[in-house]
Amino acid sequence: MSSTMSTMKSVLNNTDIKQTDIDAIVQARHGAAHTILGLRALTNAVSSSKGYLVISVFMPDVDSVAILDKKTQKQLAVLTQVDEAGFFVAKLRRKKHFAYQLKVTRNEQVEIIEDAFAYSFDSQRSILGELDIHLLNEGNHQKPYQKLGAHQHSIDGVEGVAFSLWAPNASSVSVIGDFNQWDGRVHPMENIVHHGNCSGYWTIFIPNIPLGSLYKFELKDTHGNTLANKADPYGSQAQYRPDTASMVANEQAYPWQDAKWLAQRAQRNARNAAISIYEVHLGSWKRADNGDFLNYREIATELIPYVLEMGFTHIQLMPVSEYPFDGSWGYQPVGLFAPTARFGSREDFQYFVDSCHQANLGLLIDWVPGHFPSDSHGLAQFDGTHLYEHEDRRLGFHPDWNTLIYNYGRTEVANFLRASAMHWLDNFHVDGIRVDAVASMLYLDYSRKEGEWLPNIHGGRENLEAVAFLQRFNEELYSQYPGTFSVAEESTSWPGVSRPTDSGGLGFGYKWNMGWMNDSLQYMSEDPIHKKYHHDKLSFSLVYAFDENFVLPLSHDEVVHGKGSILARMPGDTWQQFANLRAYYGFMWTHPGKKLLFMGCEFAQGKEWEHDGELDWQQLDSHWHSGVQRLVKDLNKVYTSTPALYEKDCMHDGFAWLEHDNSEQSIYSFVRVGEDGNSPVIVICNFTPQCHQDYQVGVPVAGFYQEILNSDADIYGGSNQGNLGGVESKLGQCQGQEQHISITVPPLSTVIFSLAWQDN
């Protein structure tokens, strides 16, 4: 035996360290490396070893390691290398633990460092305490994103990063990153013991990790097989795709300047408020001259003034949670807690939200709890088991999108998802959450054939676990963040989507009115000569308009996948297409329900939306397109300044038909009233190219009715047929009213009148 090997064996014989433990640590498969590494009491039975401590360090690629008394900086011992891979050991004649540092020599360079294993789990000092684990196991932790993931932390005055992860079926877990050469042997995590058992929550405190450091988790399954390296499920910042590591984010309190907005947003987001939403895909609204993405700060500089000029009250962003594939538009996210790095950092996104609020604009984000992609660095088979998703593909796989479905019945998973939504409200001050693809969550047989799905415990098709999840999500949102609101993209007739949970509803603030959207677009696509055969398509929405609190959406979904643009669906020649679109927008803005319009639709972009370029802004050089843009601007102005058009959006007594059965002329007319009931608005929509003179419309109050908007005005590109500013009502029954007005109804138009003054 060589003298070196003899020395190594002698050192180990004087400690309680087993070669099998060293081998497991060197091979990154030791599930409890914290019991070996660091400074601890020597516990073997040799009497001569009593009153000693042993220090064990694994550091590959170093020449020597010494231990220093941190208080005196006195060198106490040089550790002996007992394994060529880099395992060092020393025995110290001391009885009590003490603060220490390591003196490391590498390539003749000496460095004094802190040892991560001087800070094994201590519920009094750890970022993840006993109560946290209890609440996480119950699925009742209010803010798990403050505990799990990577967080700046301090122990005994030492600054560093606390890493915590839920992986109950892993046999070992390590943090790997650019601070340890992505070596899974260096920083094995500790599986926290809770009530005498391993909890499945792994943690480690690593001193002196700089902000911006890249990291992942290396896991081994129950059989010791190494899994694909995983990004942090709770990571709040990620690498720019195609790279997939998480980043240690700057979590210092952002200097928010939006207190004024927060104080008033409950009123701005109320159901009796004017809400007109501009839906935006940040990657394709505008781009830099070289085609690169703008960052959040640059977008704020350009987007916010534009939205203000257009008169919208809110911006809604398509998903900004980190996602790997541009072509998913964000609807297949991997990092539910991280703003996508495509447009900048966490702080940059906070700046964007803050800028919106300072400009009195609300901000909503799309949130995707319905499914997730199977990318290897994501949640799929996270710890070697189906941890986040259902194991049975009949419950856990989406055939439409080739994605995986969350197991909503698992308390930790439901807690994770709810927390991701609350995180955006908490740390980013967003005003609302629009939940994507709710129908796919509610129905077990969604897009499945017979035999491809499993019924619930009652034999039905309803996903009872998803229902309970959505109800609790809404309860938490409205109780913890008053003044914010939720919106469901729900395309079926599920009852009570926007009704309170205590009355059996799902608890959403609003539901997208997909029925209105489908029916109205089908109607508008018909040639005027055929519209009379489809007259009820446009009026049917009022049969159920107040069953839910509705948002009328013309969203991105209506301008993709071969559907063409909204403009392209309008029939006729160029003049008629634009006139039809203007009349349609007029109908939409006066119909009960809040408004949502996808970017580009406000100036009638001619082609289908493409995510990999910017909008066709050059089309605004055409008077056709600039006319539609001006109309939308004026519609928003009329809408937000006319209480009758928004105060009773969700109440049946705010709307009444005047005429909905005039199929021969394809004319509709109705009245809207606000909460005072004294300032009615009269709307007339004509969906044929025929102009009608002296057309009589009933009005509820005698007086002068001002024409406040006419979509046929020449400033919008119309033929400029109108009513010279307004008309006086006349006595005489019409459409069930005692008074009427006699007006010109322009071709393919919506005309809006407001009572300017009332006759005595």
Image (tube, grey):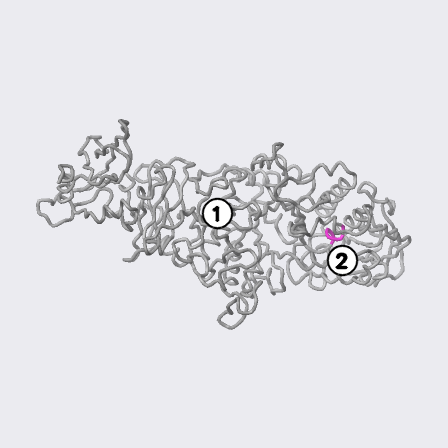
Label 2 secondary element: helix
Looking at numbered disc 2 in the image, what kind of residue is underneath it? Tyr
Which residue is under mark 1?
Answer: 335
Count residues near mark 1 (Cα–Cα under 10 Å), then give few for <14, some for 14-19, many for 20+.
Answer: many
Left or right relative to 52: residue 644? right
Question: 215 above or below 167?
Answer: above
View extreme (bottom): residue: 459
Q: Earlier in the sequence, mark 2 or mark 1?
A: 1
Q: Nearer the viewer, residue 760 or 662?
A: 662
Magenta stretch?
A: 586-590
Q: Nearer the viewer, residue 211 or 260?
A: 211
**Disc 2 to disc 1, how far (Cα)?**
40 Å
Whether label 2 touches label 1, CB < 8 Å: no
Percent coordinates x, y for residue 40 in the rendering? 20, 44
Q: Nearer the viewer, residue 617 or 643?
A: 617
Marker disc for residue 523: 2
Percent coordinates x, y for residue 497 in the rendering? 59, 61
Percent coordinates x, y for residue 228 in the rendering? 40, 49
Looking at numbered disc 1 in the image, what kind of residue is underneath it? Gly
